[in-house]
Image: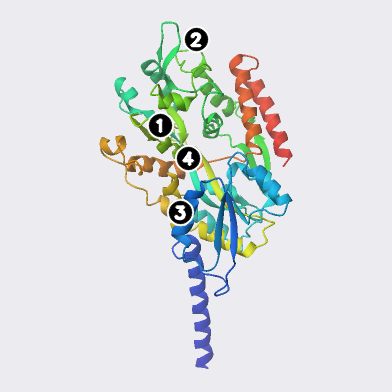
Amino acid sequence: MQKPKIFQMIIIGVFVVFVIFGFLGFSGKLPLPMRGGDVNYGEVILWGSIPVSTMQTLISDNFRDEKSVSIKYVEKNAETINRDFIEALASGKGPDIILIAQDEIIKNLDKFSLISYQTVLERDFKNTFIEEGEMFLRPNGVIALPFTIDPIVMYWNRDIFTSALIPSPPAFWADFYNLVPEITVLSQGGDIVKSLVSFGGYRNVSHAKEIVSILMMQAGSPIVFNQNGRLSAALVISNPTNAENPVITAMRFYTEFSKPDKDSYSWNRSLPESRAMFEAGDLALYFGYASEYQPIKQKNPHLNFDVAVVPQIGRTSTKLTFGRMRGIAIVAASKNPNGAFRAASLLSGKNVVNEIGTLLGTPPVRRDLIGLQPAPATGETESANPPADKLPDAALSVFYDSALISRGWFDPSPNETNQLFMTMFDNVTSGRSSMTEALAVAHSSLEKFLQSY
């Protein structure tokens, strides 16, 4: 009678061990074991727009001794990767896995093979990756495993603020109004010589759509509603309290800085592109991606600048910025689906995610790595003069914090919605349409784009 009990205990013990190892594998605390013993899944083709030199370094460093799968990376132009992908699928020569951004999800849903929630538990996914990664979750499975995150942060010119006797950059949007008279400089003819911020315009504002998205999402609009996979526009929101549409509130704030008759006047269409003006030292605040830190430094090594988390509406509001996330998606037409899943699992592991962030100058996409962020720098030297190949800890700390609060929205067609937003703001700033009218037209157009998918 004793033997069966011992046998049952052994079976239960083995089962518990396998469960623990499975959880640790996905969480990154242990490498994922090869399924099927010594199975070799062969070569897996990965497409992406990350430079091939960066990805080859990543693959060589992490998978040199990997026996289960061989990953071959093919770099594609960021502007044409989606078109190339469609053409390759049509000819039967597509990749097995692809790095896809969150704004490319909707128009490519039918081209990916979902990872079931039996394979990757939804709770484990949410516990492993930062919140924006949940854009890759569908009602019936996972579209992609998060790989990189590049949040929008606020770059600020320290010399401009110091000359104005202002010790730190603004933490709230309301602070901008008082800063304009202190920082923006006009010539005798009324031309803007030095500007606080490039708000109000669109065509010469780098990442205008992302900036406007931040303001709208912070105001309470998701831009696109997602109800169990069904998408609908959310630029016009009915409010039972009769309060103003939060999107109009956001638009009004943004456009205030382009009105010459206002004390907040700080930008117009005749000025250079905003990043170029910041690099030249004539723009106090620039909103750009974390990955732009080193390129800005290389463009003007003498520019004395720092970074901060994007301002918020108030102290009690939910903190939020925009983030561009890439995920690893398995192509439905892959001839090696098991190898594709194995490669995607390896690429989303802790060590790989940490290294790709270091190589790209961006924060990691995993929660267990975000918790290990560097302490903010306490002195001026490190922030002002970091080594050429290393980001200062002060900047990294801001990037980590920004990754944690990053959000995105389901963009049905990035190029078309960018044109839609541009037209909306051109009509408002030119006086051709009121904010309410322009917003209604944009809402209707966005709804039609979403219905197409």
Q: Position of residue 76 (x, y in %)?
A: 58, 45
Q: Report x, y in % for residue 25.
A: 49, 65
Foreground mark, 1 or 2, reads 1
Residue at image mark 3: 57
Tell me which residue sits at (67%, 25%) in the image.
Answer: 440
Q: Which residue is mark 1?
A: 299
- Kind of residue indicated by mark 4: Pro
Helix, strand or loop at mark 4:
strand
Q: Nearer the viewer, mark 4 or mark 3?
A: 3
Rendered image quadrant of residue 285: top left
Q: Nearer the viewer, residue 158 or 99?
A: 99
Q: Amino acid at mark 1?
A: Lys
Q: Quadrant of the C terminus?
A: top right
Residue 261: mark: 2
Question: Of label 4 and label 1, which has the lower sequence position?
Answer: 4
Disc 1 secondary structure class: helix
